[in-house]
Image: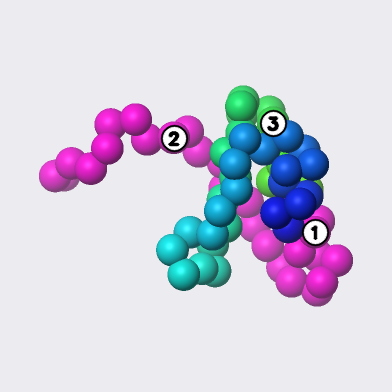
Amino acid sequence: VRDSALQENASGFSISGSGPSLFAVAPSRNAAYKIGDAMVRAWEKHGVKAVIYVSPINNQGARIV
């Protein structure tokens, strides 16, 4: 999955906490969808269902809501 994301030009890739979520950093929204689709296809090759969520990076940081 990581290799698939990086082959689609992800700027970075990591596991979120202890898993099971993975994330990739993309240079644009269009690239994010392309990278996400590649990641899903990589999981599907191993019989794992995956879903992508695309969102901007939070530049505000932690706050009380």
Residue 17 position by quadrant = bottom left
Q: Can you tell which mark lies on residue 12?
A: none
If you read the primary sequence from the N terminus, does the residue marked by circle 1 or circle 3 appear first?
Answer: 3
Image point (73%, 43%), residue name? 6
For the residue carrying disc 3, how many other residues have a C-alpha within 10 Å: few (<14), some (14-19), or many (20+)?
Answer: some
Find disc 2 in the rendering and name its residue. Answer: 57
- Residue 64 position in % (x across, y down): 14, 44
Find disc 1 in the rendering and name its residue. Answer: 42
Residue extending farthest to the left is 64
If you read the primary sequence from the N terminus, does the residue marked by circle 2 or circle 3 appear first?
Answer: 3
Q: Quadrant of the N terminus?
A: bottom right
Instruction: Give how far apart the Cα atoms at labels 2 and 3 are.
Output: 14 Å
Image point (50%, 38%), residue name? 55
Find disc 3 in the rendering and name its residue. Answer: 31
- Viewer can see residue 37: no
- Residue 62 position in % (x across, y down): 23, 43
Image point (68%, 28%), residue name? 30
Q: Is residue 1 above or below residue 56?
A: below
Instruction: Give how far apart the Cα atoms at labels 1 and 3 are.
Output: 17 Å
Total number of numbered labels? 3
Image point (76%, 52%), residue name? 3
Q: Secondary structure at mark 1?
A: helix
Q: Nearer the viewer, residue 49 or 62?
A: 62
